Image (spheres, helix red, strand yellow):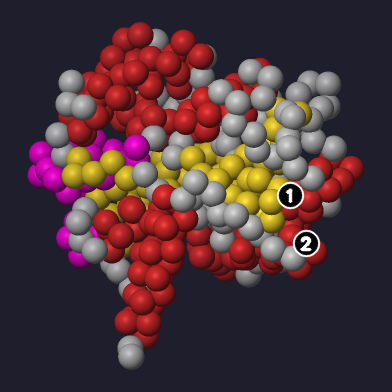
Amino acid sequence: MTSLARRLGVTVGLAVALSASASAIAMAEDKDLIVFDWSGYEDPAFHPGYIAKDGDSPTFTFFGDEDEAFQKIRSGFKTDLAHPCSQSVVKWREAGLLQPLDTSKIEGWNDLNPGIMKMKDLATTADGTAWFLPWDWGNTLVTYNSEKIDEKDIASLKAFADPKFKDRVSIGDNVDDAYALASLSIGLTDWSAMTDAQFEEASAFLREVHKNVRLYWSDTTEIVQALSGGEVDLAWAWNDAAVQSAMAGAPIKAKRDTEEGLSTWVCGYVRLKDAPGSEDKAYDFLNSINAPEVASYLLSDWGYGHANAKSMATVDKAVVESQGYGDVDKFVDKTLFQSPVPAELKQKMIAEFEKIKAGY
């Protein structure tokens, strides 16, 4: 069997496994800890220390996007930990869903990347209370088939609306990523103060993109399969789509240097109020994901940066630089950071995106 065939076999096997896990209500492992997460993050390589100490993986349940997760938790769903991103943490906290973190129980808390920790109101509030452990950070960016698309044709994000790409495009079924793309396309890198006129312009752009969309992807497995299998050639996707497709031998690349830029986010873990499981195991999990060996795997196999600067320092510098994570300030230059938006604007985005996907 050739090296390419072996890699494809591994990728297909992983895709089947991830699809199965995503469709399950829960992966019943250690019932003393429930983690509400994105599909794929149940990978044991993300929490080897937890397995070593507690004997098994936690029980994982899955959500498709953070608005779905928010509504489910607010409706009474009980979980110990969850994995929201930068644009949602404040909303979850203000809704009373979270409990503070005891940072004295988190190994390496003081080693978290200063550039990430200074992001306003993300990890801690003004009184020093910690609510969020930043963990993975990366981009949503242009991802394309380099054998079918000339890079000069995707110099601008407006390419997503170019009729030449009809039925060859995919963007995430995720309102935040969709409006990040739309905001950037109209020259907006701070969506927190979006005007009504800008909202209308951004929504109009997404309607043009919709004409080219073959599928709205819902998880990493789906977009990797679509790109690697040739179903789509141009996607607005997370870093892992290009990394995992390339590992399977597919000619998929990510483009960081479009005219308008790209989108940046930071995700991590929170403890939920009235968490039903073991507090000790919750901190075992948080300490496990913060470990140096996890940083290497997260970057090399998923294309994401690790928020623990000390852990990232253990990764081969050439790998760090090749993925663009060597300098946080440079990484977020010319980017739309997915910060919280006013609740009224977020509801407008959600409602409008549903209409756009339905063809209205």
Q: Residue at x 27, y 56 (%)?
A: 226
Taking depth in this image into account, of 25 and 313 the one nearest to the observer is: 25
Residue density around tag 1, few if under 14, some if 14–19, many if 20 or more, within 10 Å: some
* Residue appearing at x 46%, y 50% in the figure: 24
Relative to 178, say whether 252 is above or below. below
Q: What's drawn in magenta, residue-wise?
A: 145-173
- Tell me if 191 is positioned left or right of 245 in this view: right
Position in image of residue 360 (x %, y %) = 18, 21
In the rendered image of this protein, does residue 75 appear above or below residue 40?
above
Residue tagged 1: 32
Of residues 260 and 352, the one nearer the viewer is 352
Tell which of 142 and 150 is nearer to you.
142
Image location of residue 117, percent across then percent down: 71, 37
Local crowd at mark 2 within 10 Å, few (<14), some, or many (≥20)?
A: some
Q: Quadrant of the N terminus?
A: bottom left
Quickly name the residue at label 2. 54
